[in-house]
Amino acid sequence: PGCLLLQFLSYLGACDRLLKQGYEEGQVEEAMEMFQYSEKKAAEFLHLLAQFNDMGFQQNEIKEVLLLCGNQREKALEELMMK
């Protein structure tokens, strides 16, 4: 049980740090779940999601492409451009 509590506190801390960077709560929770609670991968995903969103791409397409490309920016951008 102590181990689960530590994991939960770590998760909350990671979410808090991502929220303070200006990401929406729903997106933070979704990204954390998608990347098995890896704050680093979730942060990369959220950063790229925001970046591609600003370029005018559709959010659902961005999510799909980022997952397929493992958060590789150039590869994801190529895929998005071909859609």
Image (cartoon, grey):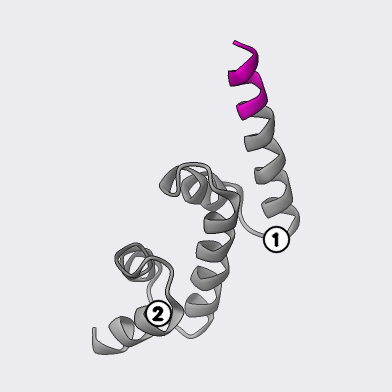
In this rendering, the answer to whether 41 lies above or below 83 is above
Residue 24 position within the rendered picture, expressed as x and y whole percent measured from the top left: 61, 54
Displayed quadrant of residue 83? bottom left
Q: At 35% across and 81% down in the image, what residue appears?
A: 75
Provide the secondary structure element on which disc 2 rests. loop
Q: Position of residue 52 (x, y in %)?
A: 47, 78
Residue located at (38% from left, 70% from top): 62
Using residue 70 as the reference point, say whether residue 24 is left or right of it. right
Q: Which residue is mark 2?
A: 57
Q: Nearer the viewer, residue 54 or 14?
A: 14
Identified at 45% across, 79% down, the residue is: 73
Asked if disc 2 and disc 1 are in contact, CB closer than 8 Å, the reply is no
- Residue found at the far left of this picture: 83
What span is in magenta?
1-7
Q: Amino acid at mark 1?
A: Gly
Measured in 3D between alpha carbons, the distance from the residue under mark 2 to the one under mark 1, in whole angstroms, is: 20 Å
